[in-house]
């Protein structure tokens, strides 16, 4: 096995700083905090499908029955709140990992998240008015008054009344910011609140009550000073932005940070780098899927949420701003059947393997591969530090990422619909959920691509193992 | 109540749970009463406190977390090791069980 200069260089110079970054308190909190949003994303996906069944006749019937709105309600309160789950989860995990009572910090984080946004929505009349407006629709989705008619009627009202009707509606929380659009802000807020809260606890900024006070009562006061300082600081930031720029923190972060970052993660280059890095980390024996997931999910989950919102509104297409690279692109393509898309090796063991090692590992890996787990191959075959299989191991995810990007880009397969399937969902089934039957067919094709790339390399490696085994048996027979 | 508790951890606790069943078979074959379970790396802290394992084994894919986890295991007074890569890949329950037993002595 080649463990030459490159291996040493990577292990000693390249990996440590990356590992250091991945293990920082902030990234750990991000990764483990986001986990809390997963059940809601997956349950919400079910409601998303129900509110928007891909079969038109069924979808129309559900809409007419009024249940579409009910499913939308359930979707909005689960998947639609991912930024809320992230803000609470990240603040919570950060402080939990530091060994303090975590829930007050998670709640403080949520408070700050809401404090930093305008609690208002644009008046719905503005969107409904004019030629380009949506008009007024009834619950079944039929237009009962066109945009121009609405505008004509409003124009008859006295000016004061018109101004009143077009003013933003205040005293409400705008759910737009609670979903994918508020995600990066939620992550930043969660991490900063976790950090600030912990620092103050460490510095001893808390109210200590005499011992006679019951613990339950005293605990309520512990969070008072850190939470108070954080909330007062946030209020000043809110005031500063409101008075100088007439905007709020969430809009600012969305425009300056989230939009460009999402664009980066959604580019072809971004997809290829992510695919390559997963294999790269694994080649050196560390969990590439986990590490790249931690780094990218903060961007890819908002991409998923954007697509879900478009799908929900019934106008999912690249022209409307759908993303190609979403979290499902990562889970259900780049890591399909396990990192390195090793299904090709499973196929090889089933039909062509000769060596005992290949055959016995293939038997162990058969079922896990269906659920996208391939540690037996990674460590047993192995793929880690194995020059014989390095080329297909790096090439397959990159080729699959490239071709999947291409088929979506050229409209052969529609964009991923934002439905999230757990990463353990078997291939083809997951494809059906995350993008319909065309996506399922495409997933099946990627399995063939994997087989095509791995096969010749596996054959050669198998021969090497087989020769070694034969030599060993011959030796033993000679001894006996 | 089992004699000893062995805790395994990997990224999500999925692939180690495969190994767990192999180890349980090996323990049964040797006539030993062990409680063996797998968990995710993010839950190690929690489980160290709630399950009080006698030994903690990490999957090789998260060996990069070793320093961090070692600190937590030391605080809890639980011996810890990384599972041998080949044994892990081959899902060799007998060998991994042996390694765990050596740490528990």
Image (tube, grey):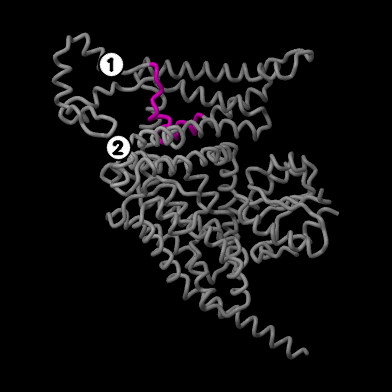
Q: SS of the residue at dot 1?
A: loop
State which quarter of the image contains the N terminus of chain A.
Answer: bottom right
Q: Chain of mark 2?
A: A
| A438 to the left or right of A384 | left
**Quick one: A169 or A247, which is closer to the camera?**
A169
Residue A170: percent from left, percent from top: 36, 16
According to the picture, the residue beneath numbered tag 2 turns out to be A64
Cα–Cα gap, marks 1 and 2: 32 Å
Residue A158: percent from left, percent from top: 17, 9
Characterize the local packing of mark 2: few (<14), some (14-19) or many (20 or more) Cα atoms within 10 angstroms. Answer: few
Are labels 1 and 2 assigned to the same chain? yes
Q: Chain of mark 1?
A: A
Q: Does the magenta portion include A207?
A: no
Q: Nearer the viewer, mark 1 or mark 2?
A: 2
The furthest residue to the right: B105
Quadrant in the picture for residue A249: top left
Residue A210: percent from left, percent from top: 77, 12
Q: SS of the residue at dot 2?
A: helix
| A366 to the left or right of B21 | left
Mark yes or no: residue A277 visible: yes
Q: Residue at x 57, y 47 (%)?
A: A17
**Magenta-colored span:** A171-189
Q: Residue at x 32, y 46 (%)?
A: A58
Residue A307: percent from left, percent from top: 36, 43
Q: Which mark is residue A167?
A: 1
Q: Residue at x 77, y 40 (%)?
A: B75
Residue A326 position (above or below residue A281): above
Judged by its main secondary structure, the magenta piece is: helix
Mark yes or no: residue A4 visible: no
């Amino acid at each position: 096995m080649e463990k030459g200069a490159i291996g040493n260089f990577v292990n000693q110079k390249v990996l440590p700083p990356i590992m250091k970054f991945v293990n920082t308190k902030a990234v750990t909190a991000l990764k483990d905090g986001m986990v809390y949003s997963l059940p809601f994303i997956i349950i919400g996906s079910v409601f998303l499908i129900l509110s928007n069944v891909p079969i038109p006749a069924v979808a129309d019937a559900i809409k007419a029955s009024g249940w579409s709105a009910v499913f939308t309600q359930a979707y909005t309160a689960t998947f639609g709140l991912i930024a809320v789950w992230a803000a609470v989860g990240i603040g919570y995990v950060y402080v939990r990992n530091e060994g303090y009572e975590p829930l007050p910090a998670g709640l403080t984080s949520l408070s700050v998240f809401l404090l930093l946004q305008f609690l208002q929505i644009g008046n719905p009349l503005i969107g409904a008015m004019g030629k380009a407006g949506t008009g007024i629709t009834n619950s079944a989705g039929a237009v009962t008054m066109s945009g121009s008619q609405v505008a004509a009627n409003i124009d008859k009202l006295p000016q004061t009344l018109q101004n009143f009707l077009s003013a933003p509606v205040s005293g409400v929380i705008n759910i737009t910011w609670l979903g994918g659009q508020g995600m990066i802000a939620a992550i930043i807020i969660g991490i900063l609140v976790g950090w600030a809260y912990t620092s103050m606890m460490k510095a001893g900024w808390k109210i200590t009550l005499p011992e006679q006070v019951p613990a339950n009562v005293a605990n309520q006061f512990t969070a008072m000073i850190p939470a108070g300082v954080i909330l007062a600081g946030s209020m000043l930031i809110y005031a500063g932005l409101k008075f100088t720029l007439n905007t709020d923190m969430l809009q600012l972060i969305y425009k300056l940070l989230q939009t460009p970052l999402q664009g980066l993660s959604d580019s072809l280059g971004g997809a290829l780098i992510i695919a390559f890095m997963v294999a790269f980390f694994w080649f050196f024996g560390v969990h590439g899927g986990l590490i790249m997931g931690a780094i990218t999910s903060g961007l890819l989950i908002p991409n998923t949420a954007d697509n879900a919102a478009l799908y929900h509104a019934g106008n999912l297409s690249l022209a409307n701003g759908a993303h190609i690279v979403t979290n499902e692109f990562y889970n259900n393509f780049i890591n399909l059947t396990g990192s390195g898309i090793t299904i090709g090796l499973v196929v090889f063991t089933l039909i062509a393997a000769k060596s005992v090692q290949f055959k016995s590992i293939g038997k162990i890996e058969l079922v896990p591969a269906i659920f996208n787990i391939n540690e037996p191959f990674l460590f047993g075959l192995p793929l880690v530090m194995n020059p014989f299989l390095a080329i297909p191991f790096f090439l397959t995810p990159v080729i699959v990422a490239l071709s999947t990007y291409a088929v979506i880009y050229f409209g052969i397969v529609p964009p991923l619909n934002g439905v999230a399937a757990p990463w353990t969902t078997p291939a083809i089934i997951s494809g059906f959920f995350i993008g319909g039957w065309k996506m399922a067919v495409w997933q099946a094709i990627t399995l063939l691509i994997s087989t095509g790339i791995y096969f010749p390399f596996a054959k050669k490696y198998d021969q090497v193992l087989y020769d070694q085994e034969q030599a060993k048996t011959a030796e033993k027979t000679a001894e006996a | 109540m089992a004699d000893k508790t062995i805790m395994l951890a990997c990224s999500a606790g999925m692939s180690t749970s495969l190994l767990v069943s192999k180890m349980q078979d090996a323990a049964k074959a040797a006539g030993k009463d062990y409680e063996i379970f797998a968990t995710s790396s993010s839950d190690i802290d929690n489980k160290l406190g709630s399950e009080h394992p006698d030994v903690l084994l990490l999957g090789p894919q998260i060996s990069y977390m070793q320093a961090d986890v070692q600190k937590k295991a030391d605080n809890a007074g639980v011996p810890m090791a990384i599972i041998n890569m080949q044994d892990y890949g081959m899902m060799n329950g007998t060998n991994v069980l042996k390694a765990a037993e050596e740490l528990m002595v």
